[in-house]
Image (cartoon, grey):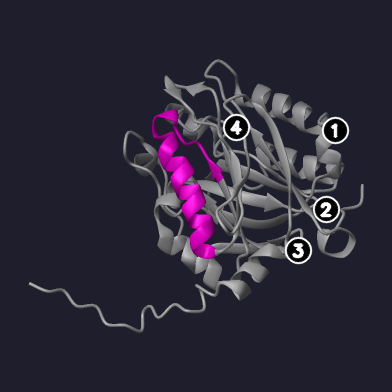
Amino acid sequence: MPHRSPRKDRIALRVALFQVASPDDESVVDRIQRVGAAITGESQLRQADLLVLPELWHVGYFAFDHYASAAETLTGPTVTAAKDWAKALGLFVHLGSVVEVDEQGRLYNTAMVVDPDGAIRATYRKVHVFGYGSREQELLTPGDAVTVTPVAGLPTGITTCYDLRFPELFRSMADAGAEMLAICSGWPAARLAHWRLFTSVRAVEQQSWLVACNAVGTQQGVALAGHSRIVDPWGEVIVEAGTDEGFTVAELDPTLPRRVRAEFPALADRRWPAVPIRVES
């Protein structure tokens, strides 16, 4: 199926968020098959430009004891499946993230975008690995680079979950030209208010579209928040899911970030770091 370019053929960019549950009693192999069947059988995706999945859905973010056994290279089963989905549906697939293992045996929380031809367009190793009530810092190596890549014609910054708490990362993506921010997450229900706050604030700060896909269900006794959402550059929530597994789809105007930045030039008015810092005693 040929890919449909929204900049040439349509005004709207059609984005689908797939909230995935990762129950403890389901194997990685079975989950990839189940998720793949849902994706290829979802009629809404036939007209979509971009599909986004959650963080580490293949193993389950909180399944720390299984990270090593579920780790894969960029030619592994989860990545290969995403390539097949992208080609079959003719869209971009933001795979969410997987536990990636490199040649030295180091593990990373790696997000990636696959294009409609089934090629990996970009990868992003999570820079801010989580420590609070989590073993991610113990098990995984932090990434050391920011990623911005064209997705269906729109420059897109790729980040993951805990990154939401670090505004400087998002500002660096805006400085690199990002007009959309794509976030995969395994955000817990206990901090749902923070999820809503940060996803809205980051969109407004960077005057960008923000698309955020979160996990659902329960993993290792931890309830996930769901509430995947799309926020526009003014901070308006275009769509927000609930707590069930499934697809949420919305159409975005890809020209809106540029129009907002022209009308309200907050990014252009920045004087940082030109002003000095004074610490008064």
Q: Which amino acid does label 4 sit on?
A: His
SS class of the residue under badge 4? Answer: loop
**Label 4 packing within 10 angstroms: few (<14), some (14-19), many (20+):** many
Q: Which quadrant holds residue 38? A: top right
Residue 157, percent from left and from top: 59, 60
The residue mark sitting in front, 4 or 1, is: 1
In the figure, is residue 57 to the left or right of 195? right
**Label 2 packing within 10 angstroms: few (<14), some (14-19), many (20+):** many
Q: What residue type is labelled 2?
A: Asp
SS class of the residue under badge 2? Answer: loop
In the figure, is residue 29 to the left or right of 226? right
Q: On the rendered image, what quadrant is the C terminus found in? A: bottom left
Mark 4 → mark 1, Cα distance in angstroms: 23 Å
What span is in magenta?
A: 184-206
Question: Which label was assigned to residue 117?
Answer: 2
Residue at the spot 50% in from the left edge and 72% down from the top edge: 266
Q: Decide whether the magenta segment is chiefly helix, strand or loop.
A: helix
Q: Which quadrant holds residue 40? A: top right
Residue at the spot 59% in from the left edge and 42% down from the top edge: 229
Q: Name the residue under label 3.
A: 153
Q: Mark 4 points at which residue?
A: 58
Residue at the spot 44% in from the left edge and 55% down from the top edge: 127
The residue mark sitting in front, 3 or 4, is: 3
Mark 3 → mark 4, Cα distance in angstroms: 28 Å
SS class of the residue under badge 1? Answer: helix
